[in-house]
Image: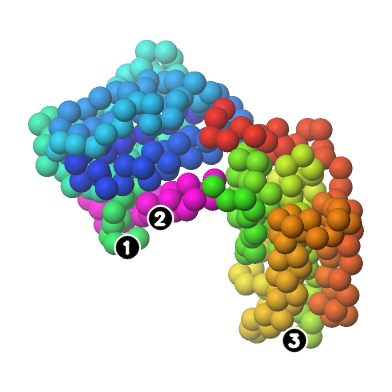
Amino acid sequence: MHVAFVLDRSGSMSHLTDAVISGVDEFVSELRRDPGDTRFSLTAFDTRVEHVHIAVPLAEVPSLAETGYEPGGMTALFDAVAHTVLATDERLRGQGREAEKVMVVVMTDGLENSSTDYTARTLNELIQAYDGRPNWTFVYLGAGHASLAEAQAAGADLAFERGNAMRWQAEEAGLLMALKEANVVVTALDTFRAREMVDRFCRRHLIPQIDIGMVIKTKKERLTLASGQVIASIPGFACLRCWFLDDATLNEEARERPPGYDRNPGAPGDPQVVSMNGTLASEACNCVLDMVTAFSGGRRGVKVWRYDGRTGVLEQGELPSRRADCDACAEEALGDGH
């Protein structure tokens, strides 16, 4: 696959500089987690268009900060996107790789004001022609838009499909930067996918994580399962992917999981989980306090605490051993690197 990233470097992006650097670096880190030979190109634009990287292997892509990303000047958005698309196509055709999957990602606040080669109409025609190819995808990341609808409208003006237009929020990138400075991360997330992503992030940055999870299932408005756990996911020990967050579980969740806590898709309403989650949250606090103060004298250890919400029993158990072939553990201590 080839990823062509078109990045706004105009003056209107200057207040987002640190967040953009963090966001692009995290985007590249996510790409590295997928198997396969992915090449990365970066086009940065202000008044002029600069091809910063051309078909670079992901392992060799440096931090955006090392490219001298400093917003300033005007916005040649139309020219940057068009020239990137045409240059990518010409290069792949010359290498006999025109059937290769191509993803064009555009991050901008959408304020075009200085293109000389392309207009909104001619860029629209170009994107529609390439988007009609089965192996080309266009993604719009709207920076600074007030809402998703506004980002989708800006993407649509460029002929991007609304489903591929997203609002990129600097706060999210800022949150990742803040998390890197955390001593401990405590999570209580709604999906397996989110739990897996945070667990990987903490592994890469050697941050201890306390994971809280709760599963509820009802039948005919009666509670048949209320199972929770507090897991100490600590660098050097088994991660969540070593245990239960495998590909089969993640794929099944994406296909079949109903919204909310209740695993019963026909449930008439949402179950009461506040008191049960409170029990788990209290035990998670004990885990953090022990990490900070060692009040247990080592008796708590790196464990899992299982909770039966129907009986009120909380039991300590052992974590499984680390899997030698765990791809998440293989990323331990890599940080934002390769």
Cα–Cα span, label 1 and label 2:
14 Å
Of the pair 158 and 329, the residue shown nearer to us: 329
Mark 3 or mark 2: name the one nearer the start of the chain: 2
Do the CB atoms of the residues marked 1 and 2 lie less than 8 Å apart? no
Mark 1 or mark 2: name the one nearer the start of the chain: 1
Q: Which residue is mark 2?
A: 171
Magenta span of residues: 152-180
Label count reads 3
Q: Which residue is mark 1?
A: 147
Q: What secondary structure characterizes most of the magenta part?
A: helix
Name the residue: 72% across, 37% down.
329
Position of residue 148 measured from the top left corner of the image (x, y, whole percent): 35, 60
Q: Visible in this render: residue 123?
A: no
Drawn side of residue 275 relative to residue 81, left or right = right
Q: Which residue is mark 3?
A: 221
Query: The residue tagged with tag 1: helix, strand or loop?
Result: loop
Position of residue 9 measured from the top left corner of the image (x, y, whole percent): 25, 36
